[in-house]
Image (cartoon, rainbow, N blue to C red):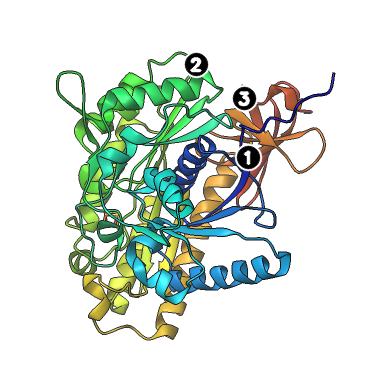
Amino acid sequence: MTATPDTKTPARKKLYVKTYGCQMNVYDSERMTETLAARGYDAVDTPETADLVLLNTCHIREKAAEKVYSDLGRLRKLEAERGTPMQVGVAGCVAQAEGEEIVRRMPQVDLVVGPQAYHRLPAMLDALDSGAGAQVVTDFPVNDKFADLPKTRKASAPTAFLSVQEGCDKFCAFCVVPYTRGAEYSRPAADLLAEAHRLVDSGAREITLLGQNVNAYHGEGPQDVWSLARLVREMAEIDGLARIRYTTSHPNDMSDDLIAAHGEIDALMPFLHLPVQSGSDRILKAMNRKHTADGYRRLIDRIRVARPDIAMSGDFIVGFPGETDSDFKDTLSLIRDIAYAQAFSFKYSPRPGTPAAGSEQIAEEVKAERLARVQAALAESQAAFQQGCVGETMPVLLDRPGKFDGQMMGRSPYLQNVHLTVDPARRGEIVPVTITEAHRNSLGGVLAGTHAP
Ligand code: SF4
């Protein structure tokens, strides 16, 4: 029998999403892909054959918008070379910050959608299809977004992200987040538990709870408002969910119950990213951080009492306007005191529209020299932590194939990459690994019990 072509089912289209920046953008890209799958798009890994390309952008780094414009220029060239039409959209924080300006500068762009509005992508595509011209949506209807996204999300790996909170009310003087992501919003606890169950049912063993200011989480619970600690406690009860993490936190939102949770909940991993930015009280005040360097030290002391093996991570900005040599030395001494397991450090660069952007800037060469010194201090501290792991046996979640045949990569409790030789069929298992080698950004190990003396 000859098969009759199905004339009713439209052909599936190809979607390429490029993700810039943080884990929240990784989460948002997954949700955009899921939303568009329901509208007939299958994800592909490169833009060459894509019908629709979405750039999910980040505004944190310097010249972020310029980088997006040059990527758009490359896409325009690619479309001309291949000779078939490509729809192009800009999502994320640059879309929020630039809005209509993107379409004005790059008329090839069909869609501009802010981080709180991407649930409207299908409707925006419908409008495009009906000939309505470029669509720009940058409102902040954050609660609509989560309510309107499909409830079908599955884990694609043993580790998964889950956005629980968005936006920020802190207004640090250097940061664009309160302007690009809007006011703090916490998703209802029941929705998060349902999403976590779906992730675990589809293979996730570890979930990282995400928020721009995640420990400010205060979501509607069945009877009362839940804190992040309460949410973590409830998630820890999910059968099959072995590990929970959360990021990024503000020191002022490390409540007593969250600190206690670190000591009481085995599934809450002993690794905490807690940015401080500077070790100088004068600069912390100018940054509008609303805490002192010693307040941060005391806070970490309390966290370490609750969970003695906790590994700390942080963020540092050097060369903030007004930073003197003495302020900078205070930052170096804080780094020595805390003994970070890892940390990120950046030169200050002004973000248009933020309070510090108009202040007198420190000379570039001074910033560069300070950054080199901070990075050397952090590298020393990280190397000591990595080296201290050699000889230890720790549970490692096997989450992805390694570079070589028969090799797997896994995650230690302290968020280190660990490579070892093990059957790839064991992906998703948590296995005891004896660490035999320490490198700058990874560890090497062997399955416990197989270590040659
Ligand atoms: S707390 Fe974090 S997200 Fe909020 S303004 Fe400060 S740096 Fe930005």
Q: In terms of sequence position, does the residue under pointer 3 or pointer 2 come before the other?
A: 2
Q: What residue type is labelled 3?
A: Gly
Q: Is the CB atom of the residue marked by disc 3 within 8 angstroms of ligand 1's nearest atom? A: no
The residue under label 1 is 12
Q: In terms of sequence position, does the residue under pointer 2 or pointer 1 come before the other?
A: 1
The residue under label 2 is 240
> Can you tell which mark lies on residue 332?
none
Q: In which quarter of the image is the N terminus?
A: top right
Residue 238 percent across, percent down from the top left: 41, 16
Residue 93 or residue 406, whichever sits in front: 93
In the image, residue 342 sits, relative to residue 371, either above or below, namely above
Residue 373 percent across, percent down from the top left: 46, 71
Q: Distance between the residues labelled 2 and 1?
A: 35 Å
The residue under the point 68% across, 61% down is 84
The residue under label 3 is 428
Element assignment for label 2:
loop
Q: Which amino acid does label 1 sit on?
A: Arg
Q: Residues within 10 Å of mark 1 (few under 14, many from 20)?
A: few
Q: How crowded is mark 2: few (under 14 residues within 10 Å), some or many (20 or more)?
A: some
Is residue 59 at least partly visible in the picture? no
Which residue in the rendered view is the most extreme toward the right?
1
- Quarter location, residue 358: bottom left
In the image, residue 345 sits, relative to residue 445, either above or below, namely below
Query: In the rendered structure, are the residues bearing label 2 and label 1 in contact, judged by CB atoms less than 8 Å apart?
Result: no
Is residue 95 at least partly visible in the picture? yes
Residue 192 percent across, percent down from the top left: 34, 27
Residue 389 or residue 370, whichever sits in front: 370
- Quarter location, residue 396: top right
Query: In the rendered structure, are the residues bearing label 3 and label 2 in contact, judged by CB atoms less than 8 Å apart?
Result: no
Q: Which of marks 1 and 3 is in front?
A: 1
